[in-house]
């Protein structure tokens, strides 16, 4: 008898099949109230919580549902952490990856410096490597901070990611080739950083991409012609880099995708 005979399958809303076994695995990853409080307080401590502009409920015995910026699902799991323009400082702790059901993480317009961890000498990424645990995440917005370090390749494990905003930081390194695994990504904003190297060919596998904004970095090389396979692409911004043959790629992309495509060079 096939091992799949008694397995029931449903959809996850992203075109992927999900079995009841996956549901069991999700249940095993759920945190209790004590664990969630401990993780949130680690974030509060590492990201300058005492100086936050809005911090209702934080560092108090109040029910977690009353904590500023936090939204929970019916099982009590953190699904949204939204702290825009709230004077967050320091580094994002590794415990971020413990919130396995997190869908939206938005700490834009703050003063965050990058990723923290127990071994600071290895904290070379702009967000923690543990972000790869966040398989339910759709939005990662950390724009307009002071992030240093490289983009962790583990980010490509966030298969449901749709919006990635890391613009206006001090991010270095290259765009991970693993990003080709992000089949649901619609928005990739990496503007105003210090990213170098070429655009990875694998980015052409992100078939849902609408916007690719890479302007004002240190990138170079030829823009992959394979990007012409991105049928949903509306705008690609390449200004302020060291790319070559830009006029040629502009003509080529518009020929393949239509004159309405914005190619900013």
Image: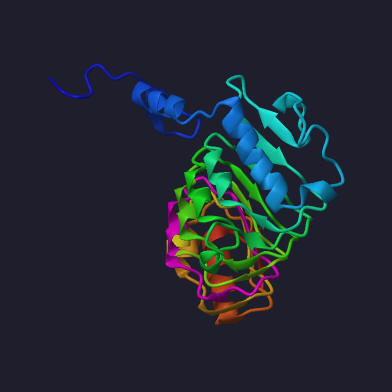
Residue lying farthest to the left in this orientation: 1
Residue name at image x 53 percent, y 69 percent: 121
Image-quadrant location for residue 151: bottom right
Residue name at image x 47 percent, y 29 percent: 12
Residue bounds of the magenta highlight: 177-201
The number of numbered discs placed on residues in the rendered structure image is: 0
Across and down, in percent, residue 243 comes to: 57, 80
* Residue 198 is one of the magenta-drawn residues: yes
Q: Is residue 41 visible?
A: yes
* Residue 97 is one of the magenta-drawn residues: no
Q: Is residue 179 above or below residue 107?
A: below
Q: For the C terminus, which image quadrant?
A: bottom right
Across and down, in percent, residue 202 comes to: 43, 62
Residue lying farthest to the right in this orientation: 53
Q: Pick the residue in front: 95 or 138.
A: 95
Q: Is residue 214 above or below residue 26?
A: below
Q: Pick the residue in front: 69 or 192.
A: 69
Residue name at image x 82 percent, y 53 percent: 87
Q: Is residue 106 visible?
A: no
Q: Is residue 43 left or right of residue 221?
A: right
Residue name at image x 56 percent, y 57 percent: 117
Q: Is residue 259 above or below residue 20?
A: below
Across and down, in percent, residue 1 comes to: 12, 19
């Amino acid at each position: 008898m096939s091992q799949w005979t008694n397995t029931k399958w449903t959809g996850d809303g992203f075109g992927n099949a999900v079995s009841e076994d996956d549901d069991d695995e999700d249940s095993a990853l759920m945190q209790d109230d004590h664990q969630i409080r401990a993780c949130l307080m680690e974030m509060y401590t590492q990201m300058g919580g005492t100086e936050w502009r809005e911090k209702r409920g934080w560092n108090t015995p109040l029910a977690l549902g009353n904590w500023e910026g936090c939204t929970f699902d019916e099982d009590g799991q953190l699904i949204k952490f939204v702290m825009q323009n709230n004077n967050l400082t320091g580094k994002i702790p590794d415990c971020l990856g413990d919130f396995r059901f997190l869908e939206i993480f938005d700490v834009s317009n703050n003063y965050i410096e990058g990723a923290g961890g127990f071994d600071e000498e290895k904290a070379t990424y702009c967000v923690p490597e543990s972000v790869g645990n966040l398989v339910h995440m759709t939005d990662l917005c950390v724009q307009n901070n002071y992030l240093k370090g490289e983009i962790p390749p583990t980010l490509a494990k966030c298969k449901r990611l749709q919006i990635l905003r890391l613009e206006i930081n001090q991010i270095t390194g290259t765009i991970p080739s693993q990003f080709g695994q992000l089949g649901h990504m619609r928005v990739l904003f990496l503007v105003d950083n210090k990213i170098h190297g070429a655009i990875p060919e694998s980015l052409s596998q992100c078939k849902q991409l609408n916007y690719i904004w890479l302007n004002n970095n240190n990138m170079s090389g030829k823009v992959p012609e394979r990007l012409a396979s991105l049928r949903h692409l509306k705008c690609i911004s390449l200004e302020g880099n060291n790319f070559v043959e830009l006029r040629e790629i502009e003509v080529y992309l518009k020929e393949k995708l239509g004159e309405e495509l914005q190619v900013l060079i």
